[in-house]
Amino acid sequence: MLFSEISRKQAFITHLSISAVIFFILAYLIIFDWYPSYYFEHDGGDRGLMTIFFVDIILGPGLTLLVFKQGKKWLKFDMSMIILFQIVALSWGIKSVYMAKPSLTVFYHGRFACLGQYDITPEELKRLSQDNAGGPVLAFLRRPDNIKEYYEFIGDAYKAESSEIYFYNDRFETISENAIERIKSYELDVEEGIERSKQRVEYSRLRWEKYKKTNGVSEDVGYYPLKCRYKTGMVMFDFSQGKIVDYIDVHTAPAISSIEIINNIAEE
């Protein structure tokens, strides 16, 4: 059908319908694949979805409604530019949302942290993936055991001009039995952690009490903070399965390790 044979309303509805199909496909990927479960809200999936919605549903069809006029001399050119602009903007939006998606969740120094696709090299991600069944891969970054290792960590941070953990991706380990034992060494008293966090203390306390009454507290599960880009919470890590099995919207300070850093410089 030529542009000259359709009305503005028909052009708008056609453009909107095609854009809606594309949006729902992308929404499914974002919600169920790229940002599953609590990662959707905590690591920016909702913001990514709104970006895609604006570009795909509002911007493209909106420009068609604004520009389209039956019989207009340069109508084909205008519509071609609108479609091209929407494709370019949508491609940028999809790439941005995909590269920001949580691909790795790393345990370090008493808490789990979300890392995006751009924070980890494909080679390192493949090394850590193992038999991952979907969703962000879990990994472990061992805290220095002695002063020498501690200075090495500081040196790496100084060279990178940042202490963010993604600079240590070559040190990330898979969730092995040794890693699980290390994670176990972090004792988190949830009530005390809530008080130390100083974030929405009363809200977190009520949520925790409600969770305990409904689900109980298991010795086979460890409770640890989760820090993502936009929100923090608390996850339940099952020691026997070596994975995160539940989440609760509770703010708590990081757990404290029972393993002390050894000053071994004099010995060496």
Image: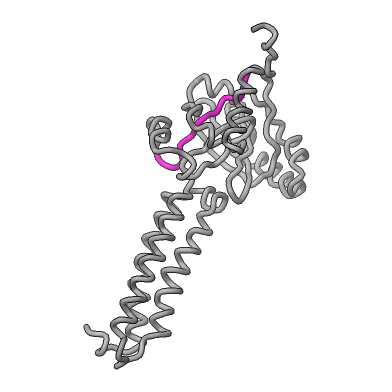
- Eyeballing the image, is 57 above or below 212? below
- In x, y percent, where is residue 100? 48, 50
**Residue at 38%, 70% in the rendered image:** 86
Residue 184 visible here: no
- Eyeballing the image, is 174 above or below 259? below
**Residue at 68%, 15% in the rendered image:** 262
- Eyeballing the image, is 171 above or below 98? above
Residue at the outermost front position: 159
Residue at the outermost top position: 267
- In x, y percent, where is residue 248? 61, 44
Q: Is residue 264 left or right of residue 72?
A: right
- In x, y percent, where is residue 203? 73, 49
Of residues 164 and 178, which is closer to you in this image?
Answer: 164
> Is 142 within the magenta?
yes
In the picture, which quadrant includes the N terminus? bottom left
**Residue at 61%, 38% in the rendered image:** 162
Of residues 216 and 230, which is closer to you in this image?
Answer: 230
In the picture, which quadrant includes the C terminus? top right
Q: How many marks?
A: 0
Q: Which residues are magenta?
A: 134-145
Q: Is residue 18 left or right of residue 175?
A: left
Give the colouring mode of the picture: one colour
**Residue at 47%, 48% in the rendered image:** 101
- Eyeballing the image, is 251 above or below 13? above
> Is 250 within the magenta?
no
Residue 5 visible here: yes
Magenta stretch: dominant secondary structure: loop
- In x, y percent, where is residue 97? 46, 55
Residue at the outermost bottom position: 71
Q: Is residue 157 left or right of residue 251?
A: left
Q: Quadrant of residue 135?
A: top left
